[in-house]
Image (spheres, helix red, strand yellow):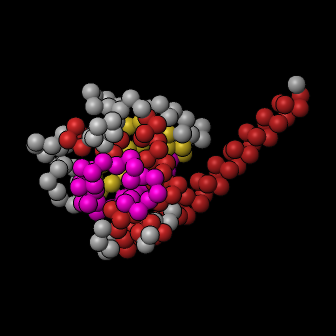
Amino acid sequence: MQSQNKIDQLLQRRAGEICEIETKYYELLKNEYLVRSIEIKKIPSFWYKCLRNHHTLPSLITEKDWELLQYIDDLSLDEFTSRNRVKTYKLTIEFKPNLFINNNSLWAAINTDELQSYSGSGIDFKAPNSISNFEEQNKPSFFNIFIGTEGESALSNSAFVYDIINGIRIDIWEDPLRYYEA
């Protein structure tokens, strides 16, 4: 059908142009996000309060998770676009020294093309802590997103990872002040 071919071509062209515009503005915003990060680090418990005041994320976070999240020093979200226009979102959380993990930072990444797979930095727990200490009955730990797809503790439900990263990306990352002040 000739008209459908024309529609498909226009939709593909539109997608390409939208991707170019989004990439252009992401590059322009990158420096401002860095400046904002420096300002935010001066505000005690900023990211903890933003996560705590969000309308849906607290339901995905266990009480033990909150104990570790009190040590957040910085939170960032990076966006990468591949040549074939697949976007990858990478959430990075930096921590102050704490009693739970040895890592200074944790990251998790998921791309919009393969939502079934994701990757994570892994977590180096301080003894006697482990991921199971952070889970509640029928509720996985927020920190499962950083374990990745390898190993016995990996999440089989990547939708959980996507919900957390996307929730932070869409709601919190662009304007965290509205959740800090809530």
Residue 165, image x, y percentages: 44, 48
Residue 5 covered by magenta stretch: no
Residue 85, image x, y percentages: 60, 41
Residue 33, image x, y percentages: 46, 65
Q: Quadrant of the N terminus?
A: top right
Q: Which residues are magenta?
A: 51-80
Image point 89% across, 28% down: which residue? 2
Residue 73 to residue 139: above or below: below
Residue 34 to residue 18: above or below: below
Image point 31% across, 42% down: which residue? 141
Q: Quadrant of the C terminus?
A: bottom left
From the viewer's perspective, is 6 left or right of 141? right
Asked if one can make out residue 151 in the rendered structure from this viewpoint, the answer is yes
Image point 24% across, 54% down: which residue? 68
Image point 10% across, 43% down: which residue? 127
Q: Residue furthest right?
A: 2
Q: Residue furthest left?
A: 127
